[in-house]
Structures are given as C-alpha cells and as structure tokens.
Amino acid sequence: MGLLSGCSPDFEGMGEQRLALSQQEQGNIEIVAMQTPGDNDKLLNGILLAAEEINRREGKLLGRNLKVHIEQEGDTFEATKSMIRRVVANPRVAAVLGHRRSSIAVPASAIYEHSKVVFMTPFATAKNLTGHSFQYVFRMIPSNEVMADQLASVAKTLGYQRVVTLYARDDLNRETAFLFEDAAINQGIKLVKSSSFFEKDSNYRPIISQFNNESFDAIFIASSAPAAALMAKQLREMGIQEPILGSNSLNQTAYTDNAGSAAENTIIPSIYHPDEGNPVTRQFIRQYQEKYQTEPDYNAAQGYDSVMLLAAAIEKAGSTLPPLLSTTLHYMPAWVGVTGIHAFDEYGDVNGKKYFFKVWQEQAWQDMPAIHVPYLIDRFTQNQKTQTNFPKAFTRRMHDDEHNTYLLELAQNILKFNRIGIIYENTEDGRKASGYELLQTLENQHKLSIVGCEVPFSLLDNKETERALLACYGTLSLNTDALLAPSFHGIDSKLQERLNSSLTFFKIPAISLDERNTDPNISLVLTKRTDVDAQGISGMHVYSSLLKGLKVHEFAERLKNLPELTVNLHNLQYQGFSEQPILELSPDNYLYSDSPLIRGGSTQ
C-alpha cells in the first residue's frame, strides 16, 4: 500500500499500543462513529441508540461503558486522512464505524488494518474494500457484486429483455455498471447501449439521443444521486418513460427531491425492510421513535446493527483484544439484527444479508413484494446443487398439495434429514390433515424414510391424548432426524410447545407448513408468500406500470408460490445444522426462543 510507505506515521506501533492497552481491560470501551458532510443524522442516531441500550444493561458491556466519539469526515480521502490518523493514534479506540463513500473507506481501511482498529463500514460497496485479505476490515452491506446480481434478477423477473446502462466515470460507478452488465447478460438480457458520462456535466441530452430511438425495457443508472436525478429529468424530457433501475446511492432525498416527477418508476435496492412482525425490529422502531420522535430509516438501522453486532462479538470474545475480536467477528455464529442475518467470511464480506427493493411512485418509496426472492432461490439451487429446479417449480401454477411437497423438499435440502417423524390419526382425513400423504409423495421421489406414530385422536379424551403424544414424542426423538409438526386442533398450544421443546433438547428440528405457527420451538416454517395477493391487489399495484409482457394478476400468480421462510436460528445453531443454506436463502422472518438452553446467542 503506497499510503503506508515512506514517511507515514508508525501505524504498526500504534497497533502495538492498542494491543497492550486492550489487555488491561479497564475503563470505557471506546469506538468512533464517522459523520458524513450533508448526511442526515439518522446513522448516528442509530449508533447512539444502540450504545445507550447497551449501557443500560445490568452488566453493560463486559462490565464497562461503551463510549461513542463522533468525528466529521471530509468530502475526499485526502481531506479526511489527518483525522483518521488522529483517531488511530488513540490506543483506546477499539473500532471505527462509518465512511459512507467507498472512495474514502477503501484507502482508510489500510490505516485501520495496520493500526489494529476494527473497521466496520455500513455503506461501502466497492469490491476491493475486502480484496486485500485484511484482518480488521468488515463490510456491513452486501457488495456491488451482490447488488448487481440482485438488480439483474429483478429486471429478468419483471420481464425486461433489453436494457440501457448509463454510468458516471469514476471507479465505483464504473464497477457497479460493469457488474450489472455481466449479471444482466447472464440472465439473458440484451444490452442495447452502454454509455458513460461526467457527473459535472449539466447536459446529458447528446448521450440520451444515441439511444432514444431504440427499443428497450429499462435504463440502469450508476452515479451519485444528484447526477442521476438530472439524468432522469432529461430522459423524461426527451420522451423516455421506461423504468429506471438504480444502485443504492439513489436511496436518498438528493435523488427524489432533485428529480421530482421524473423519479417515477425508479427501482432501487434497500437493505432495510421495517417488518414490525419481527420482535427485534419492533423493539428497535419503538425505541427509536420514543427517543427521536420520528421513524427510523435504513441509515439508522445500519448504525444500530453495527453497534449491536460489535457488542455481540465483544461479549463472545470476552475482550476487546484486537486479534481476538477480529477472529470472533470472522467466525462467530450468524447473528440476526434489524437488517437481517450477518455472518462474515474470511475476507470480511457479510453473508446472509440481502437487498429488498422499492419503487418511487406517487411521491413515495413503495415496497415491491417478493421481488427479491427469485434471486435467493436461484442462488440456493446453484450453490446447494439441488436435483430439483426450485426457481422453475415455485413459479408455475400448482395444487396446494404439490406446492407443500416442494416446500418439504426444500426443507430436506436445507436440513439434510433422511428420517422424518410424523404423528397422525390413521384415517383418510387424519393422514391428510397431518401431512402424512405429502411425506409419502416425497418418500416416493427421494431417499426418505417416514417414521410414523399413530394416535387415535377422535377416540381419546384430553388426558389420554396427552399421554399418547408424550409417548410419540419420546419414540420419535430417538428414531428420527426431523419432525413434521402439524398444528393439532383442539389440543392445548402450551402442551404442543412443551413437546416441541423436547425435540430441541434432542437436536431434532421441528418443521411446520403453517404460516400462523409462532411456536418458538419450531425450527423452520415454510409457506407461500404472505406478502403477495393472488388477485393482484393490495401491495401488488406497484407492478402495474413496471411489468413487461405480463399482467399484474399473472405476475402475482408467479410470485405467490415462492417460498417464505421463517427460521429459529438459535435452534438450528444449537442443533448443529449448517448455516450456509440459511445464509443463502436469507429468510425474512425469525422465531425467537425463550428457553435458557438455547438463548443468549445470535438473536438476542
């Protein structure tokens, strides 16, 4: 690194001082949060909210307070470099959170690495941020490559066959555009035109005139928000009304305010989906609203998760010793925050997180239901080398029983079970209600053994039913490696929870196909999408002006059958299952355990 050569300060020496001081384990644990010029304060709000929450805990953080220092970064790395040097010269600083721009984060990462400061950047997406095998550098957002792949998947899912790409002539936006072009070609999408432009220009019409007589379905723009806004205005002025695909840099008011009505039908990725059904998200939103009297956004969510994940790593490591903390972040079990699953690989890239998508319509960002799922299913199918083409299977029309069979096959590919237990009444209605017939279909298609336990529910009173269920769970816990757990009608839900809890102790995952199942002892719930209306109404209206070659109700039919996964990550981690399939599928919903046997890990 040229940055560290010649007469540069002694960063290695600073790192040794930090190492020596952290071994004393005394005083406040100090971190630095970077503030970007012109930013709203929501990133810092999220960081400070998390720090306050940690400091209110009975044990705080290893019995110590977490202290946040706020530093103002410049517009460029050169304008920020002296401040970064001052930060790393303080041996008490254990971590730095921030640097929104990749143009600052990438060169800054070398200083943090050699100074042994854990560096967690919430927004930098450049590929080369994690391309140097650094030990202390971590990305809190999926890279440009993942974002480009997901954007291309969205374009393909919406029916786009021909696109135009426009990008600013800087390293980051050029990288983003080229990655998107490669991903689009891999999806079978044709590139009609690819042009670059200088952001400082004010007239993009000569570039637009090169393709405005061509036939295409969408335009991809990679640039800063103000430049993209000007490009959008001039595109609309020249009669081009096709949807605009943009990178996450357009997810700010500088784009929508400057573009005005020209921003209509702009599609962007976002890492935050405020699902209040998730208890972690619900608590975050409530605390943020109480403190700041406003709604949190993705900035606040990223700031909050950065601190909470860092604190989880410090607690697991039992120390702020830089090498130990870094190693813990790299290899700790997957952790669930407000913005999804976080698991770092050896390079510091985050796995498990995904992009949701939004479209600007009616002067607001509207959620695009389920549009992120085809990419996840395709990624899972390819990486797990499944025999079934799940992307094709789940997007065709089928009977509910056939769909549930595919869901169970997906569960088998995730959990790799060979012997699955089922409790059922041996009548036609009883076998169907329990899911026994679904398992028989799966048994005939794959190497799978069904271990059944019969209970004549209709002939037994409550006490007899309870004894019979206890006996079945005892038998199945010793003879299976998974259980299909139906919701038994007329049986106390608390009894069912206790029975399913016993399976967790024996490290046997309980699987459910009931979207209403909230039993925290269930490990995996698989259902149809609950965010898609099969009639093409409700949230599906956003697609009416975006689809190419499809009607909304036809599109809804395709999306409705896509799987929705709810997982209890604690259970699966305790039971010893591989996290990789879960990371690839990036579930939207989570169940949280209250059992002391498995609590206190990644989702608390």
Image: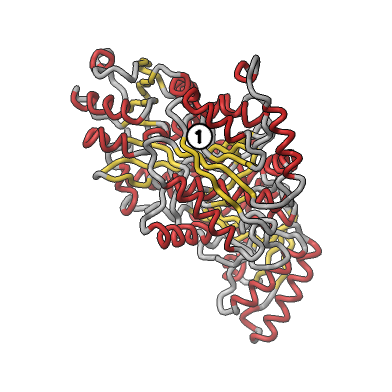
Q: Nearer the viewer, residue 324 or 485?
A: 324
Q: Position of residue 420 (x, y in %)?
A: 71, 58
**Position of 332 relative to 194 (above/below):** below
> Could you tell me which residue is drawn at 40 percent across and 59 percent down?
289
Q: Position of residue 560 (x, y in %)?
A: 43, 50
Residue 344 sits in quarter: top right
Looking at numbered disc 1 in the image, what kind of residue is underneath it?
A: His
Q: Determine if residue 381 is in view.
A: no
Q: Determine if residue 333 is in view.
A: yes
Q: Quadrant of the C terminus?
A: bottom right
> Could you tell me which residue is drawn at 28 percent across and 20 percent down?
215
For label 1, the SS is: loop
Residue 252 sits in quarter: top left
Q: Is residue 346 found left or right of 54 in the rendered image?
A: right
Q: Position of residue 193 (x, y in %)?
A: 35, 16
> Could you tell me which residue is drawn at 21 percent across and 36 percent down?
261
Q: Quadrant of the N terminus?
A: top right
Q: Nearer the viewer, residue 592 or 9?
A: 9
**Position of 434 relative to 491 (above/below):** above
Q: Which residue is mark 1?
A: 99
Q: Is residue 265 found left or right of 122 in the rendered image?
A: left
